[in-house]
Image (cartoon, helix red, strand yellow):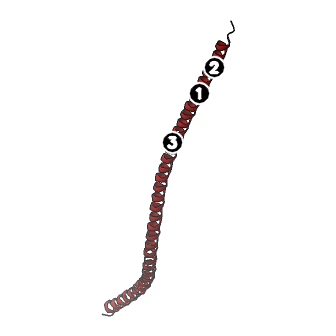
Amino acid sequence: RNLPGRRGGAREAAAGCLDRDSSGREMSAMAASTEHDNQLRTGLRLVETAYNERVRALEAEFGALRAWGQEQQDLAAASMRRTRELEAQLGAADACVHDATREKGALEARLHELTAETAMLRSADERNHELQVGGG
């Protein structure tokens, strides 16, 4: 039974189904596209958050390293000041040692003179005593 009305109706019905299928596919495609966009945005937010956290961590580490570097510079400056102070003290101590050595030499020379003088006086005293004992 090929009735003209039915056949045309079937075509219209089939065309309506195609339109609905096409709309459904478009809707599915739009939903998939929206879902994909949402996933992409979520992924980008995750990357951005991780990047920002890493930047903060590196900035904190850089700040700590900068503080450590400053501390090392301060320690080096303090060590240099202390070295200059000790070198000045060493120079003063060397001068004292030099003066003491010179004074020791002078005292040893004076001791030698006094020892020789004492020996002469004793010798003179002994001769004097012999003269007094022998002549008397």
- In the rendered image, the quadrant that contains the N terminus is top right
N-terminal label among 3 and 2: 2
Q: Identify the residue at the far right of this view.
A: 2
- Residue topped by disc 2: 12
Residue sitting at x 33%, y 89%: 129
Badge 1 element: helix
41 or 34: nearer the eye?
A: 34
N-terminal label among 3 and 1: 1
Are the two marked residues, 3 and 2, in contact with CB atoms closer than 8 angstroms? no
Residue sitting at x 61%, y 18%: 13
On screen, 21 above or below 94?
above
Q: Nearer the viewer, mark 1 or mark 2?
A: 2
Say few, some or many: other residues with alpha carbon within 10 Å of mark 2 (under 14 / 14 to 19 / 20 or more). Answer: few
Q: Position of residue 127 (x, y in %)?
A: 37, 90
Give residue 23's mark.
Answer: 1
Badge 2 element: helix
Mark 3–mark 1 Cα distance, whole angstroms, equals 32 Å
135 or 30: nearer the eye?
A: 30
Mark 1–mark 2 Cα distance, whole angstroms, equals 16 Å
N-terminal label among 1 and 2: 2
Q: Identify the residue at the far left of this view.
A: 136
Give residue 45's mark.
Answer: 3
Amino acid type of the residue tagged 3 in the rendering: Arg
Residue sitting at x 43%, y 67%: 78
Amino acid type of the residue tagged 2 in the rendering: Glu
Q: Position of residue 119 (x, y in %)?
A: 40, 85
Q: Identify the residue at the far front of this view.
A: 4
Mark 3–mark 2 Cα distance, whole angstroms, equals 48 Å
- The image quadrant of residue 97 is bottom left
Badge 3 element: helix
